[in-house]
Amino acid sequence: MVLECVPDGVARMITDSVSVPTIGIGAGRHVDGQVLVYHDLLGLAPADRHAPKFVRRYADLEALSTAAVARFVDDVHEGRFPSSAETYHMTDQMTEAFGPHGAASPEGGAAPPEETAQPRLPAQ
């Protein structure tokens, strides 16, 4: 049974009178278990958001996440990501053999260019 935003005395009376476990969210410590929304716990919501009295932030991941995404976007725009170390490579000979007009074509020679396939949209 979930007890949310109830005074701790009420939560204690209910916990003592029922045979099923009680889980509190803003119901004090006299319950069988606690729950806290992980967005609040990890600080994924903006710090200026009004949070209920019982919320305790254990981290500020919203700021860390925003900074990490900004660094990623900057690295992509500046050409720093992906680096050569973060890229799969093959030799020029392998690339030529792979095709589409190299040795891997049907008769081992250059294959004629084909029309570019257009994506098909689902029927409506």
Image: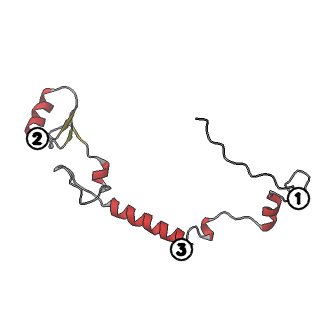
Q: Is residue 5 above or below residue 83?
A: above
The label number, if any, that marks residue 122 in the structure image? none
Compared across the picture, whether 49 is left or right of 121 comes to left
Pick whichever of labels 2 and 1 is earlier in the sequence. Answer: 2
What secondary structure is marked by label 3?
loop
What secondary structure is marked by label 2?
helix
Hey, what amino acid is under mark 1?
A: Ala
What residue is at 61 percent from the left and 35 percent from the top?
123
Q: Is residue 64 above or below residue 51?
A: below
Q: How is the image coloured?
A: secondary structure
Measure the alpha-carbon separation of dots 3 and 1: 37 Å
| Image location (x, y in percent) of residue 55 | 21, 51
Crowd rating for badge 2 (residues with CA inside 10 Å; few <14, some 14–19, many 20+) = some
Q: Quadrant of residue 42?
A: bottom left
- Residue annotated with mark 1: 110
What residue is at 18 percent from the left and 49 percent from the top?
54
- Residue annotated with mark 2: 8
Crowd rating for badge 3 (residues with CA inside 10 Å; few <14, some 14–19, many 20+) = few
